Amino acid sequence: MRVVASWLLATAAVAVGGWRWGWPGVLLGTTVVVFWLLLQFSRSLRVLRNAGSAPVGSVANAVMLHARLKPGLTLMQILPLTGSLGRRLEGPHEHFRWQDAAGDGVELTLVNGRLAQWQLTRAAP
């Protein structure tokens, strides 16, 4: 739904620019849309670069990560919370695991690109 709304807003920006100011308005609307896309691309690269610099599947504190999760988060919102890329697990959906130094871990399941469920597994004492 958000993708559809984004494209509708982009189309509206170009259309309103064309209606209000003619071809210069279309160019202005297109410039605004391209600038927004470049900002999103830059943000994605920054998040992936920061997450890629840490060991795969590691997190500072699994319990704190578990407390900060909420339904509907995207992977681009989860990666800054974890600080690393997750270890991919088998499953019908996107299934990832992060583990801290104490052995506690968090398993996340994303459905259609959004966090659907997660589970904290504690290490044996």
Image (spheres, rainbow, N blue to C red):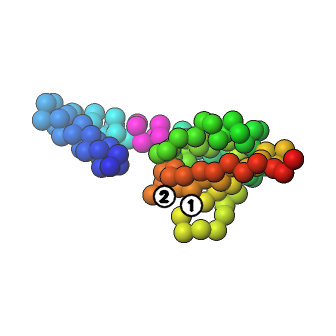
Q: Quadrant of residue 21?
A: top left
Please give left or right for residue 41 compared with residue 7 in the image. right
User: Which residue, given by chain and number where applicable, does mark 2 sit on?
Assistant: 111
Up-down relation of residue 89 to residue 65 (above or below): below
Q: Quadrant of residue 43?
A: top right
User: Tag on residue 82?
Assistant: none
| Residue at 35% in and 45% down | 2
| Residue 36 appears anywhere in the view | yes
| Residue at 70% in and 46% down | 84
Q: Amino acid at mark 1?
A: Glu
**Relative image position of residue 34 (x, y in whole percent):** 38, 41
Numbered disc 1: secondary structure = strand
| Residue 49 appears anywhere in the view | no
**Relative image position of residue 36 (x, y in whole percent):** 40, 37
User: Which residue, given by chain and number where applicable, does mark 1 sit on?
Assistant: 94
Q: Main secondary structure of the magenta part?
A: helix
Which residue is the extreme one toward the left? 19
**Relative image position of residue 24 (x, y in whole percent):** 21, 33
Q: Amino acid at mark 2?
A: Val
| Residue at 63% in and 51% down | 119
**CB-based contact (under 8 Å), mark 2 and mark 1:** yes
**Relative image position of residue 102 (x, y in whole percent):** 84, 44
Mark 1 surroundings: few (<14), some (14-19) or many (≥20) residues within 10 A: some
| Residue closest to the eye, 29 or 123 | 123
Q: Looking at the image, how many numbered discs can be counted on the residues?
A: 2
Which residue is the extreme one toward the front? 125
Examine the structure image and report whether residue 38 is included in the region drawn in magenta: yes
Examine the structure image and report whether residue 109 is included in the region drawn in magenta: no
Q: Which residues are magenta?
A: 35-41
- State how far apart marks 2 and 1 are (Cα): 7 Å
Mark 2 surroundings: few (<14), some (14-19) or many (≥20) residues within 10 A: some
